[in-house]
Image (tube, rainbow, N blue to C red):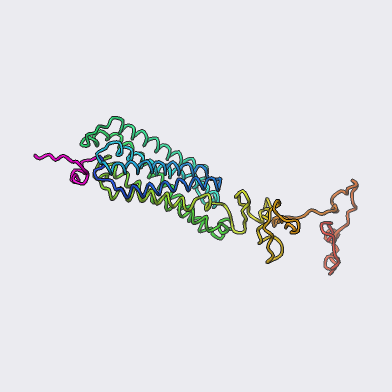
Amino acid sequence: MVLRICTAIGNCKDSEASSFFGHRPSLVAGFVFVAVASLAILANIGIAFKARRHYGFVISMVIACGMSVSGWIARYVGARDPWLMWPWVQSTWALALAPTYIAIAIYPLLGFIVGVVGEEHSPLSPKIINAGFLTSELIALVLQLVGFGVAFHDVHRNTLNVNAETYAGARIVMAASALQLLTLLLAIALMALVGLRAIGARRSPKVASLASTFFVCVGAIIATMAILAGRLGYRVALLSGGFRGAIAQNWILFIVFDGAAVAFAIVTLTALHPSFFLVAGRTGSVQGREGRFEKLHDAEDAALVERDDTRYVGAAGVSAPAYSDETAPMSVPLQPMVFEPPRSYDPQPQEPSRYESTRAGDRRSLTPQPYETGDLSAATSRDTSPKPYGSGGL
């Protein structure tokens, strides 16, 4: 038997299969995925300061991207020395947990979507949707943390015994991944059911008036959930053979499912950020200065239209001057804000009707009406004289 001492990675390619990774990690893939996750962190933080909404989504996405950066940096170090143990351990748990936080960011959005589209289209209320899916995902997260703790608390440097030493922990993590996969499939089925019912009721004003950007964001969220479900199927198959099984040593599958799939989810949810796209704005609505949307012609509340919205200010084709109260010159009159009443608005009469008491407190005389006396001649006469509005007379 001839023993060969490796002095450089270049002349030890045959022995890379005996490393913890089972292959030499790709330097290019590590650099690309670190760059993608880092840019996503900066973008989500900037969006949070700009939009000032969906803070829970932003926090979960930042954690997911941070764990992805940590895992791919560890694989980058492992590419320089595949026989180091700590890069393998760190990349294994960090890249496995990162998509969990993406799912935690998505699930609260599902309840919001159902509330906007209409609770009548969903068999579950938004509160139950949020509580149920989040609880299941948090249980899976705790199980994964326990599994990785059991697997790596006393692992040794001998790669031949890694699967045996981490067997119990790998089974716990596999059970958690299976729970995550089941939760994602149920969420996808629920959103498909809501979507089919909403399409059937597309003529209803509540669904038909939603902005197109809302549906674009919903489609991106469902596509991300489908990608994450496929990635979880890969994880269950991988963990069935252990952390260092045959599937785990296949670097192409790892790049596709634990790299490209997660990067797709991060880029999609950041580019079509819910803070900008998943808003309850409707056709015929205007956005206020704080970003909230109010529907015009609402039955309960009328919306104050912004002064710089030329669709509702002044006559047709006349635009309002784009000045604020502080910067407007004295020679340019400011356009007043227009208060548009709801369609059901009915102004009260300024004078008491024949059934109301006068301001002096006495009762007005009741004038018999034609319908009360049976005399239909007066009712059928063509009297075109003007009548006071709200006075009670015909």
Up-down relation of residue 163 to residue 336 (above or below): above
Q: Nearer the viewer, residue 241 or 311?
A: 311
Does residue 238 appear anywhere in the picture? yes
Q: Is residue 305 left or right of residue 378?
A: left
Q: Residue 283 or 82: which is nearer the viewer?
A: 82
Farthest bottom residue in view: 382
**Split into 4 quadrants, where in the image is the N terminus?**
top left
In the picture as drawn, the residue positioned furthest to the left comes out as: 1
Number of marks drawn: 0
Q: Is residue 129 visible?
A: no
Residue furthest front in the image: 7
Q: Nearer the viewer, residue 274 or 372?
A: 274
Residue 21, given in percent of the width and then of the height, sits at 26, 42
Residue 91 found in image quarter: top left
- Report if residue 65 lies within the magenta region: no
Q: Give percent across and percent down for residue 176.
A: 36, 39
Q: Which residue is drawn at the image coordinates 33% and 36% (left, top)? A: 172
Q: Is residue 98 left or right of residue 374?
A: left
| Quarter containing the C terminus | bottom right
Q: Which residues are magenta?
A: 1-19
Residue drawn at (82%, 56%) of the image: 390
Q: Nearer the viewer, residue 335 or 291?
A: 335
Q: Is residue 341 left or right of residue 275?
A: right
Measured as percent of width and height from the top left, residue 387 is found at 85, 62
